[in-house]
Amino acid sequence: EAGVAQSPRYKIIEKRQSVAFWCNPISGHATLYWYQQILGQGPKLLIQFQNNGVVDDSQLPKDRFSAERLKGVDSTLKIQPAKLEDSAVYLCASSLGGTIEKLFFGSGTQLSVL
Amino acid sequence: GENVEQHPSTLSVQEGDSAVIKCTYSDSASNYFPWYKQELGKGPQLIIDIRSNVGEKKDQRIAVTLNKTAKHFSLHITETQPEDSAVYFCAASGGSRLTFGEGTQLTVNP
């Protein structure tokens, strides 16, 4: 079974630029999550999708972050414009059902904002 | 919201010894407590989880205990091996959102 795929693996941008991350969840997994992991901290939920609908985006900085999950499969997370404090690893995770149990994480995209 | 504290932040043991990582949570409504292992350059991987109606769960060398009254849970790894070296995260959830601890860097010395 293929795991959660994410790209790119690394991204370096300057502040005020925009960036996008892509995620392909495990086939058949209805729920998709984007987490932000700052160095030395635990992952923090940014947004949760159930199929192509948003379940929880209360911690997403909506003035600069946006995410979509078209057709209930792949998802993209965008930051525009980026700030220095956005430097982190952006993790995508998926789960089979509608709960947070048994999450499968991708390897993440490491973003550096200079 | 939920707050999860994890201790210690770093732990170094000799191969074959046991390792214990402890977490406390704030929301008494939390009922699901997973533990994730994160190796360098990879995403977290679920290693064991427990629900609040169970006090202890074991899977080979790994065990988790839960004390609902005190609102704390612990991860126990016995007979540690060098490949157990990684960052371990506890988490808690009372609904649809997982709140993670800050992580414990475990180093197993050969």
Image (cartoon, grey):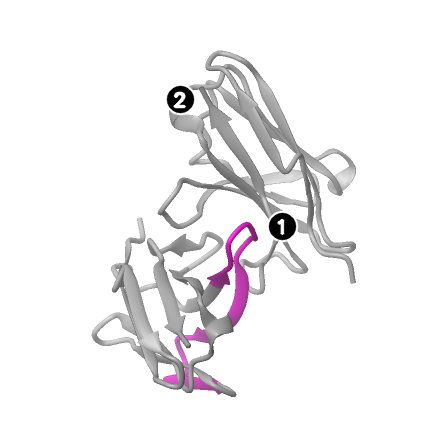
Instruction: State how many labels appear.
Output: 2
Give the residue type that dot 2 points to: Leu
Residue at the image point whose x is 52% and y is 71% from the top: B47
- For this view, does A57 lie left or right of residue B66? right
Please give the residue where the numbered disc 2 appears in the rendered image.
A84
Q: What subunit carries mark 2? A: A
Disc 2 is placed on an element classified as helix
Residue A106 got which mark?
1
Q: Residues within 10 Å of mark 1 (few under 14, many from 20)?
A: many
Disc 1 is placed on an element classified as loop
Quarter of the image holding residue B52?
bottom left
Quarter placement of the C terminus of chain B: bottom left
User: What range of the chain is rendered magenta?
Assistant: B37-58
- Mark earlier in primary sequence (2, 1): 2
- For this view, does A103 lie left or right of residue A69? left
Residue B103 in sight in this render = yes
Q: Is residue A47 above or below residue A83?
A: below
Give the residue type that dot 1 points to: Gly
Residue at the image point whose x is 33% and y is 53% from the top: B102
Residue at the image point whose x is 42% and y is 36% from the top: A59
**Front residue of this view, candidates A40 and A98:** A40
**Front residue of this view, candidates A111 and A36:** A111
Most distant residue in the left direction? B70
Residue B74 in sight in this render = no
Expressed as whole percent of the image width and height from the top left, the position of residue B51 reads: 44, 75
Q: What subunit carries mark 1? A: A
Q: Is residue A61 above or below residue A18?
A: below
- Marks 2, 1 in one chain: yes
